Amino acid sequence: MKLWKNGVFHTMCHPRDTHQSMGTDQGHIIGFDDDLVGLTFEETIDLKGAHVYPGFVDAHLHLLGYGQMLSRISLQGKSKNEVIDVLKQSFQGSLLFALGYMESGITKHDLNKISESVPIYIRHQDYHSLTVNDAVLNQLKYASESGVLTEEVALKAIDLIPKYNHDELKTILEEAIHRLYRYGVTGGHSDDLYYFNGFHDTVKVFEDVLQSMPFRTHLLIHHHTLHDFETSKKTWMDQSPYLQLGAVKMFYDGTITSKTALMFHPYQESDSQGIRVNDPQAFESYIKHARSLGLTVAVHVIGDLGLDELIDILQAHPPKSGQIDRLIHTPYLKKETLLKLKGMPLSIDIQPQFLSSDLPWALNRFSIAPELLFPWKSLLQTGLTISGSSDAPVEIPNPLLGMHAAIYRRSYHDGKVYDRDESLTPYEAVKLYTTGAQVQSMKDNRGYLKPGYIADMTMTKDNLFMMKEDQFFEEQIVMTVIDEKIVFRNTHKI
């Protein structure tokens, strides 16, 4: 048994519900304060005043994609000329792949000047688009004047890249988890099973790594891998204490960056309102297939029209009683859509950082702005559970940055605060990554600090409910604990 003392333990049952000490045994919480009198502990950890919360969980990210980003050339925050300079300096005569490009007008003609014969890929920040040179287009047997590819065509181009082997995938997953420990993240809901080595090997990579690196991993089953799931001997949800196979992932529309999110009004200087990634009949067949197996679905949807249409489909094909589906993103809504959402068996995975990073330039792409922009308070008032996430590697998977965006709604692009009435309280913002992020785990022992609950903890230097705005950007994490094991300790802080 372990005694964790001299801390401020925030149970998340109520903003002011705290304790000073906590006992754990075999990976679970056994009690607090007076409950521990008379017990004998094999180990005592002095927290020196640190604030303790249930372990933070990122409800939508790409673990392997994040690990890949950490090992690839990054183009984040670079101008067109800077991107071209980085690519020129990095080109060694073999396939070149760079990540994090924010649209700045680069086309295949720019990349062809570096090489027309060796494949060059630059993946856009939204992860739904690529810009490639003629070498890639020729391999793909696809004509494009610009070299900009989106959605399914972009995925086909990615498939041309030589795959990682099993050990290489393990290495990038380990790197991702190590970095997440430093951000206080103890678990994540990840979409990886379609994009690397296929269902079977990718699941095996997670099983192998999680044996030695605890991390509460919930993997979505991409609809293109559903047949592999069916023919495997895997069961839905728990594979081990650290691995679950969750909802069936599918896409309804695209992104604002590529002007493929499905909107009620056309984009600026365009007749296009976006796209439906799948033919409506095909999409409905994916839903029916999932339902026939008794599974829930997790659907990417960004546009306000896309969300409205998706709600109608889910209402026509609901999950089994007691199950809930999940919507991923939903940043733009019509007011009447809130009424349609009320009472539905849904949770919503939001990415608060998108308001900070994307909203100012996204508004410039609309001919008419959506009625509601990132309406988190309004969504909470429908009674739905909202979970916080980063969509890493699109954003940095640091929950404190998400909490800051949820509380202050300030964009770092222009410093402007957008729709302050939709701000969350600090307590609500922390719930996004604790109690809210656990709704899809199908467990009743996560997300709070309570006796019988798992001993996953995130510890910070300061009280998250009382911090000033600039403190969210400071180095706050002092310790990360999973299953009673300390997986990260900031020796400078504790």
Image: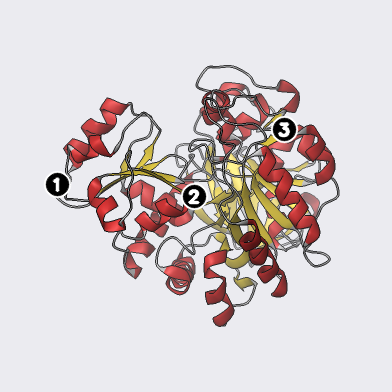
Q: Which residue is mark 3?
A: 375
Q: Nearer the viewer, residue 71 or 145?
A: 145
Q: Which residue is rendered at x = 60% and y = 63% of the image?
A: 42
Q: Which residue is mark 2?
A: 181
Q: Measured from the top left, where is residue 224 in percent x and y?
A: 52, 66
Residue 448 in sight: no
Q: Nearer the viewer, residue 337 or 470?
A: 337
Label 2 residue SS: helix
Q: Measured from the top left, where is residue 420 in percent x and y?
A: 71, 21
Q: Quadrant of residue 296?
A: bottom right
Mark 3 neighbour class, 10 Å CA radius: few under 14, some 14 to 19, many 20 or more: many
Question: Sequence order check: which comes first, mark 3 or mark 2?
Answer: 2
Residue 86 in sight: yes
Q: Which residue is mark 1?
A: 92
Image side of residue 310 versus residue 490, left or right: right
Label 1 residue SS: loop
Q: Nearer the observer, disc 3 or disc 2?
A: 3
Inspect the image, locate mark 3, and give the three-letter code of the amino acid beneath it. Pro
Q: Which residue is rendered at x = 46% and y = 74% of the image?
A: 200
What whole-number distance in Å separates the C-alpha atoms at marks 1 and 2?
A: 34 Å
Q: Measured from the top left, where is residue 411 in percent x and y?
A: 56, 23
Inspect the image, locate mark 1, and give the three-letter code of the amino acid beneath it. Gln
Question: Sequence order check: which comes first, mark 1 or mark 2?
Answer: 1
Question: Image height check: is 478 above or below 222?
Answer: above
Q: Measured from the top left, where is residue 252 in percent x and y?
A: 61, 51
Question: Image height check: is 413 above or below 16?
Answer: above
In the displayed image of the protein, which residue is found farthest to the front?
A: 271
